Image (spheres, rainbow, N blue to C red):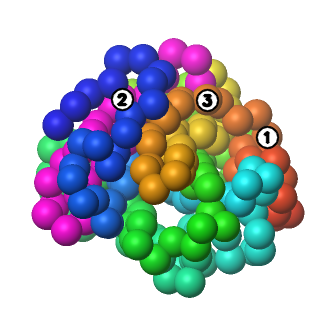
Amino acid sequence: MTKADAETDINLTALVTGLKKIIVSAGWEFKLADGEAYDTDLCCFILGRDNLTREDEDFVFYNNPQGAQLALRHLGDSRVEADPVDDQAISIDFDNLSFEIWRIVFVVSIYQGDERDQHMGKLQDMTFRVENGDANAEIYRFKVDRSKLGEATAVRVAEIYRNGVEWFLTPAGDPIKGGLSEAARQYGILISSTT
């Protein structure tokens, strides 16, 4: 297991020989008032060489749990108590990814954050992890720097990109003003601003 303290590119395929499948997961905790609840979700955008989605199915989230001809699957809410707690996860099968796919961008967003006056400023902790999907062993983990998220309702947590036959992880933690709808627009998909 390796932890990141700064933005660097991590060669996942060099960390695990013969890496074929991974599970990426995110866990979060907010400082909330009594009775307050955040509906927070992990999603990803599957991008081509032009850094845009190729079709609507390249936006993988709870209502579209499969993409890239089933090579990516949203696994839903975690029901396993672990340390750290993973709230949601997405599995990726590298062997079955089309060579048209160059990047996968992961975003955590608060559903209807603007409407409910909910934002990442109340985030206490967010962890992003990568596991070897065949061995159930953690490869990499990092914590998102919450100090720069402010009142954003979404955050670009990380991305995975292809370089030849190798796959690299770039930790991020960039706030997205305008929330998930703005992130989707940047990658070529139009969704409701209330999403």
Residue shown at 45% from the left, 24% from the top: 8
Q: Residue at x 45, y 56 (%)?
A: 165
> At numbered mark 3, what does the secondary structure look like: helix, strand or loop?
strand
Tell me the quarter of the picture where residue 149 sits: top right
| Numbered label attached to residue 178 | 1
Residue 188 higher or lower than 12, as above or below: below
Q: Quadrant of the N terminus?
A: top left
Spatial CA distance of label 1 from label 3 is 13 Å
Report x, y in % for residue 139.
23, 45
Q: Residues within 10 Å of mark 2 (few under 14, many from 20)?
A: many
Give amino acid for label 3: Asp
- Decide: few, some or many residues near mark 3? Use Cα within 10 Å; few <14, some 14-19, many ≥20: some
Write down the quadrant of residue 133 in the picture: bottom left
Q: Where 153 falls versus 57 (above or below)?
A: above
* Residue type, label 1: Gly
Disc 3 from disc 2: Cα separation:
13 Å
Q: CA distance from mark 1 to mark 2?
A: 23 Å
Question: Could you tell me if the residues under marks 1 and 2 are in contact, i.e. CB atoms within 8 Å?
Answer: no
Q: Dot 1 lies on which element?
A: loop
- As drawn, the label of residue 143 is 2
User: Where is 144 relative to 86, above or below?
Assistant: above
Q: Which mark is residue 158?
A: none
Would you say residue 36 is visible in this rendering? no
Span colored in magenta? 126-149
- Dot 1 and dot 3 residues touching (CB under 8 Å): no
In reply to whether residue 136 is colored magenta, the answer given is yes
**SS assignment at label 2:** strand
Say whether disc 3 or disc 2 marks the residue closer to the N-terminus. 2
Is residue 79 at all visible to an observer of this figure? yes
* Residue 92 percent across, percent down from the top left: 41, 66
Picture coordinates of residue 152, whole percent (x, y) = 67, 32
Q: Give the residue at mark 3.
A: 174
